[in-house]
Structure formats: structure tokens, C-alpha cells
Image (cartoon, coloured by chain):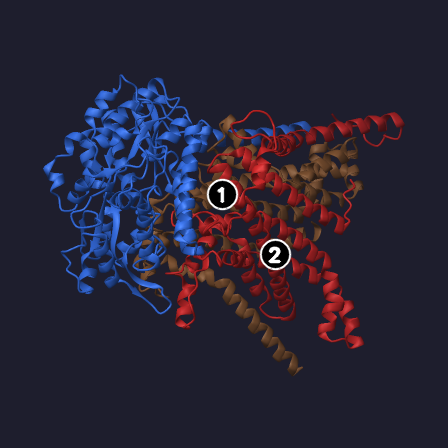
Chain colours: A red, B brown, C blue
Amino acid sequence: MRQNGGQMGSGRLSMKMHTRQAMIAYLFLLIPLVFFLGIRIFPTIYAFFMSFSVQGEDGYSFGNYVRLFHDPVFWKSVLNTFLYLIITVPLQLAFGLLIALGIERVHRFRWFYRIVFFLPYMTSIVAVSWVWRLMYDSNIGVLNQILKTLHLPQQGWLSDPDQALLSVSAMLIWQMTGFTMLIFLAGLQGIPRQYYEAAEIDGASKWKTFWKITFPLLNPTILFLTVIGAIQSLQTFTQIVNLTGGSSGTIGGPLNSTSSIVVYMYKQGFRDFNMEYASAITVVLFIMIMLITLIQLKLLNRNYDA
Amino acid sequence: MKKLKISNIIVHLLLLAGVVIVAFPFVWMILSSVKSLPDFFRFSFWPEKLDFSAYKFIFEETEFFRWYWNSIVVAVIVTITNLIFCSLIGYTLAKFQFSGRKVIFLLILSTMMIPTEMLVIPWFVMSSDYGWVDTYWGILFPGIMEAFGVFLMRQFMSGIPDDLLDAARIDGMGEFKIWWRIAMPQVKPALSALGILTFLGNWNAYLWPVIVTSTSDMRTLPVGISLYGTSDSTGIMWNTIMGMSTLAVVPMIIVFLFFQRKIVEGISLTGVKG
Amino acid sequence: MFKKGFWVLAVILITGILALTGCSKSSGGSDSGKTEITYWQYTFDSKVKEINKLIEKFEKENPDIKVTAQDFPYDQYNDKLAAAMHAGKGPDIVNLYYGWIPDYVKQDFIQPIPEDFMSNQEIEDYYIPMIQSQKMDDKYYTLPIAVRSLALFWNKDMFKEAGLDPENPPKTWDQLVADAKKMTKRDSDGKYEQEGFAWNVGGQGLHVIQQVLMRQYGVEPYSEDGKQVQWNDKPEGLEAFKFWMDMTTKDHIGDPTFLETPDTAFKSGRAGMIIDGSFNIAAYKDANAFEWGVTTLPVKEEGGEESNFGSYWTNAITKGVEGKKLEASQKFLKFLISEETQKDWLENVGELPAAASLSENKEITEDPIYGPFVEGLKDAHSTFFVKEDKERDIFLNAVDQILLNGTPVDEAFNKLVEEEQRVRDEYFNE
């Protein structure tokens, strides 16, 4: 296998070299290709086909989609999912940016702040969901006890259908803010100092400097975080299951007020074992995520040329 | 100068307020884990007296440490396979000339758009057919490689100068060795970022493991805690769950403190590059 | 060099993966001559412990059989079992709620009890009549160890504190409400600090409405063949349902979310009364914080119709178990349903023996704690469910609509009956 290097000038040799390179490339890519085709692409096609077959019936039809269209719980879950998106994404970005700006501002304890704010993102989602569930409990939870001590009306939190979605959202924001903060910090550090120096010489106020320099230069970061946040909030599942499931509640309850698309898919697919119907739900989710990704590509105008 | 200091103090105070809010659940978790169960129903802020029965229970009566082990096994294996495969694919796509290169790259990249949620149903059907349900292989096979990692590694591998590789070829080094010995050391920061992200992602994975595992022996940490929490046929054992959460969270925090610079850098890196 | 490195890596990876898959589960059973069988149940502390003890005993008697027990949270038990059965990784013997039998049979998860193992006649002779309702197409699919009925637990300390006679629990529903009112304490927000009655629907409340109140109000809840839901055939059905709902919405004697679950509320001495099964006796004994007593369920008027809800967890051999495993499974099943096990079960789990021969056992019927349950068993009806978990979800959802959304009771009730009927229609039409 030893190549005689150094003398590859002639066309034939370089041809040979090329074929050899290509062979090696295909060899390197063989297992990965099998994997991506077998574990990603093929199952996707399978799910599509499955979504067009109705459980207990032969052949393919739009049956599942028709049923979806008339399924109030599905629409409720879609609406909830959008609510999660609309509530959590702007807030986690706003908090993340504020904290990042604060940390940039101070000189001491930076590492301390950075670590503490980042902790929620690092830790096990399931574990902290249970902690929040305990804090939210309307009888033995610490939040209501604090309200009681302050002589404020106690709240239902997760047990009240009007508050449950907001309660779940609060925890989602708490968890994601550390991530947005970190990315914003990186973004802020990427802004050349000269810009600020120039602004200072011009006598621009801090406020103006932020809106004229910092914010526009952070735009790519904001877009990136919005897309990541949107996709993640469309897939919200673990937090909801652990905050609301169990025999003292129902997953996505009370009254489906916290149910998300994925939660509903899980219930249909792995509780009622109607995998065909669940597939149709995931196809809807797939389309939503694809739309967001395409918008992102358009906005970033990114080049994926190889 | 003085004015600046005051405003600095205000920023510190605001940040500290944020710290209190963000850290409170962790404090509450640890406090709750050393309360006795009746303490929960009498509600007291501080434990009336330290009660470690929850930990004793976890050690003696549950399979908590088995779940811990399962999580470690799965996360470590998947991290290793991702590091190897993603960098190999990324390297090949960045540094080799062959027809179909672009198609293959786009094919792999396009899988980034497919949500896991859509795949779990076919994966489950597949696992059922092949008998992978409730095995380690069943838990980890979907994660062996990720398109994101391929994308990341390709970006970094592109930055390696071709001359470096050609020089190695001239020295007669095999292609596999060139990748391993020459290319890999050049992208160490990217590798550590990818490793950290993959580990974290799999450590926290819930949807697929909860579907594909059934017996207690095979549960990963998140699944174990979650199912234990919902098995409240006679009321939720709050102190035990808080103990489990503490045991799951605190070691992670310690690891994080050790590697915080690396982790923070890694995540920032993907944020900027990705 | 290239080849060598690659193959070394590939071999390491593949063997690693194979080793993991291999060691994760040795699903075959008969290495070293032992037949391995698995038993699945839901997580219920006293039952899990008892089964482990029984297995130890069984394995000593049958050294050639190894039984592995697995338990799953109740909330996910059905899902996990269905998933495993679909994947062909189910257990050999499964412990299931009697209400799931029709669905399990329809899904082809379990096999009938073979004639040569125990004939229908033998089963009917051996067991009390209650279990005959599970017969489908003239076949029995499952054999229970024990049965359960409901009774009223009351907290004597709380009765005393409220100025009630601690030895005189309520006999009628109206008395129960009156007593409970005296024991209930709420703060200025209307939040409970203590409740008179651990009111619930998700626990046993649902069954009390369906099989106790309905009947006492003169409504036959289901048609004979189980195809019709008759709750709103007569106006009394709604009245019965409303009476139960009023307890929490108008009389304010209890709240279902108080201290997470009704049993926790009673266990921690913060609920004056609870309707529960004997299976919780062990848990209440453990709590040991106050004195309590057990009595039969209240009636509508003194001397009026007594009614109760009977239920049981039962055991089936799953589909596809054959040969040596079937033999071993049958042996284990026989061991589980033996009179000796049943007595042991009563003592450690608190569920009543299902064998007819033990139903007249003086030791049990005259016990101050078990007595009322045995008494209740005489008037016990067990609901024929077609899809228990779904029917239950519909019921809980209707109650949530009333409690959380303020839907009028009659509207929610009629919709509830309609939806329950639909589940039955779907089942019987297929």
C-alpha cells in the first residue's frame, strides 16, 4: 500500500491518485451512509407512509389527517405549543441579553455569575422538573407559602388550567436563559472594541450606543437563538410530562391545558398505541420545524456549498 | 468615577437578585431532600431536623445507582462514536475530492431538520422487530452519529491546510493515519465542544429512552427518576425524589465547575459557528 | 497501516456494541437447566415485597425454576406492557387489573387458562362468585389471588377534636357530610388546612359513584350485557352524581388536590374520613399517627340498600408462552392462588382471599379491620369495563370540567355518559 510519493506529476498518476482518493472517501463514508439512510432517512419516509394508513384499515388514505382536523385536543395542543413558543422565546432572549450585558458591565465575579446563571441549562431536566413541581404544589409548595406569609392570595399554579401553561413556561425560561446568556456573551465579545471607543469620542450616550452599535451587531446571534429557541419550544415534552404526569395528575393536564404537540403524539402513539395517528401528528410537527429552518436559511442566506 | 461605581453596584445587586432566583430551586431541592416526609405536609422552610432517611432509602431500596450507571454507559459510548464518526465524515467531506460529495453532505445535513419525535415511532417499530427493546443497544443506536456533529467537524476540518496533509502523504502515511494523527489534533477545540454537547444531550435524553426501556434494570437516570416520581400509588415520596434529584444534579455541577471554561467555550463556539 | 488501524477500530467498536447488547439481557431462559420465567406487576409497595417473598419460597420448592419479578409505576404499567407485548418482550405471567381483561384478550396479549390446568368448573368451585364476571366467550383468562371491596375509614382523633363521638362513624351519606363539615378547616383563601372527607374521584370515588350511589338512588348503572351505560336513563342518576360533586363544590368538605392524593391526606392525619380499599391498611398502619377505625360504606337512608364495589388484580399467562416455560408458569400460578398464599397475602397486603373456602373463615370475618370489608363483599358489584383506562380518563375529565372550568354539572354529566357509551359502542361493534 505504500505510495511512491514525490513523483505524481504525470496525468495518469494523478488520475490514479484521484480514483484512490475517491475509493478511500467512499470507504470512510460507507458506515455513516448506511446509518443516515437506515436510521434517519428511511424512518422518516416510513413515518410519512404510516401517517397515511389508518389503524385497522387497509390501503392509504387521508383518514388520520381528517381526524386530526376535527380533533379539538390536537388543536388545543397546537395552540399550546405556539403559546409556549411565543411566551418563552422572547423572554429567554430578553433575560439572557440583560444578564449578559450586566456581566459584561461588571469586572468582579464574572465567572461566578456566569456559572450560576448557566447551571439550570446544565442540569438534568427531569430532576429539576420535579423540584419545580414541588415548589408549585398548591398545598405544600413553597411559592404558595411565601404568598401566604405576605398575605397575598395563593395560586393554583399547575393545578389551575389558566395558570398551568404559564407555570410550565416559567420553568422553561428559567432553564434556557443560561444558554442564551452564554451565546450573547460570546456575541458581545465578538464586537470590536473600536466601535465603542469611536462612539465614546462622539459623545454618544450608553443607551444610544446600545441601540446603534451593540444591538445591530448582535442580530445574527439573536436570529440564531430565536431559531434554536423556537425549534426547542416546538418539541417541549420532558418538562410537561414530569410537571404534570403521574397518578395525581394527567400528562398535559389539567384539562389538556399544558399539552403540547409532542405530548399529544406520545399519548396517541405510546398510550393508545395508535402509531399511525401519532405519525400524522409528527408529520405536522416536521412541517413546522422545516418551515422555521427554511426561514432561517433564507434570513441567514447561508451557503452550504461543499 | 464615583458615579460609575454606584451604577456598578446597582448592576451587581441586580445580578445578585437574579442569582437568588436562579439558584433557589437548587437550594430548595437540597433542603427538601433532608426533610422527613411528614415535614412536607406540615410545611416548614427549614427541615425541623436533618433526616437522611431518603438517602438511606435510595441506597438500599431503589435501583438508583444502576440507572446512574446506565446513563453513564449510554452517554459515554454515544459520545465516543460521535467523536469518531462525525470527525471522520467531516474530514472526508472537507478534504477529499470525489463525485457525489455535495449530495452526500446535503443528504446528511438534511437530517438535521427531522425531529426526533417523528423518528421515535419507526424506531420503536424497528426495535420491536429486531428485539432491541429494553437493551443498551436499543437506547443508544439512534444517537451513534448526528448531522450537527458532521456539520461542525466539516467546518473545522476545512480550516486545516491541505499542504499539511499532502506532506504527510508524501511521507507515505496511510490515509487513516493522516486523519487520526494529523487532522484530529488540529481540531481539538471542536472535538471537545462536540464531546460536551453530545454527552449533555444524551445524559438528558428522555423521550426515546422512556419509550424503548421497560424493565427497571435498563432505565437511564432521567427515566428512572421520572417513573419513580409517578409511581405514587400512595402519595408522592417527595423527600426520596428530591434526594434522587440532588444526587443527579450535584455531581454534574461539580464536574461543570471543573470543566467550566471548556464547557462554556465549547457551547459558545457552536453558537458562533453553528 | 491504513487498513490495520481501521479494522482495529471497527473491531473494537463492534465487539463493544455486541458485548453491551449481549450482557444487557439474557433473554433466553434455560441455561444451566433452569427454566426462567418473568412476572410483571405494578409498583405497590406491599405487593412488591410480598411477591418477592413468595418467589423466594417458590424457588426453594422448585429449584429448577427461576422467577424474575419486575414492577412498573401504575401510571405507565399498561403502556409499558403493551409496548413490550408488541415488541415480543413481554413477561410470561402478568398481573393485571380485572378491568383490562377484555382489552387484553382483544389485543391478543393473554391466553386462556387451559382446561387441563384448571377447568371452568374447577375455577367456579374454587373461587367466590364475584370473579365469574370476567368470563369471556365461555373462557377464563385469569386467576386472582385476592379480591377487594371498599369501606369507610375514619380518624378517631379528628372526630374527638371536632366534638363528634369517635366510636360512632356516619351511617348515611347525609351524616357523613354533616360530620365532615365539622372537621373541615379552611383558611381565608378557602384553602384547606384540614378536610372532613378525603373527597376524590380519581381514587375510589369514581367507583363509589358508579356502583354505590347510583344503585342506592335506584339506577342500574349498566345494562345486563354491559353494552349500555344507563347512568342518565333516570333523573336519579344525575342526582346521585350531583350529590357527590356537591360534597366538594357546595359543602366544601374536601378537595381532591389537597396534599396531592387522598390517601396522603388521610395518612398524614389531615382528613377525617376516606373511602378506600383494604389494600391501604398496611400504609395506614405504618403512618401510625392517630387512632382510626373501619366501617361499612354509608347508605342513602338508614336501613336502605347497601352496595359496594368489588375489584381485583389477577394473573394471566401471556400469549406465546409454551413448552417448559408454560409448565413453569402454570406451576407458579398454582402456587400464587393457593389458599396458603391467599392467607399470607391478606396478612401482608390486606386484600381479601378470593377462594370460596376462605370467605366464611371466622378469623377473617370477625376481625375489626377486615370484617367491614368482608361484609361489603356481600353486596359488591364489579363494573364490567371494556377499556378501563379510557373510561376512567373520560370520567376524570368530566369532573375536571366541572371543578376547574365551571361547566354545569348536568351538561358535563350528559356528555360524560355519551362519551362512555361511545367507548362501549366502539368495543362491541368491532
Query: Taking C63 as reference, is B78 above or below it?
Result: below
Identify residue for label 2.
Answer: A86
- Calculate the distance from the C-alpha at mark 1 to the C-alpha at mark 2: 35 Å
Residue at the (75%, 63%) spot, across then down: A216
- Mark 1 vs mark 2: in front: 2
Q: Which residue is mark 1?
A: B72
Q: Chain of mark 1?
A: B
SS category of the residue bearing label 2: helix
Label 1: which secondary element: helix
* Nearer the observer, A25 or C170: C170
Task: Please provide percent x and percent y for residue C188.
Answer: 35, 70
Q: Tell me the residue at 15%/43% (across/down).
A: C371
Amino acid type at circle 1 is: Ile
Q: Residue furthest toward the front?
A: C234
Q: Is residue C384 above or below residue C317?
A: below
Q: Amino acid at mark 2?
A: Ile
Q: Where the C terminus of chain A falls, by quadrant?
A: top right
Q: Position of residue A197 (x, y in %)?
A: 77, 71
Residue situated in front as seen by the camera: C36 or A231: A231
Q: Chain of mark 2?
A: A
The residue carrying pointer 2 sits among few (fewer than 14), some (14 to 19) or many (20 or more) residues within 10 Å by Cα, namely some
- In the rendered view of the protein, which quadrant contains the N terminus of chain A? top right
| Residue C269 in which image quadrant | bottom left
Q: Is residue C118 left or right of residue B125?
A: left
Q: Position of residue C103 (x, y in %)?
A: 39, 31
Q: Is residue C255 visible?
A: yes
| Relative vertical location of residue A302 with respect to residue B89 in this rendering, above or below | below
> Most extreme residue toward the right, as rendered?
A10
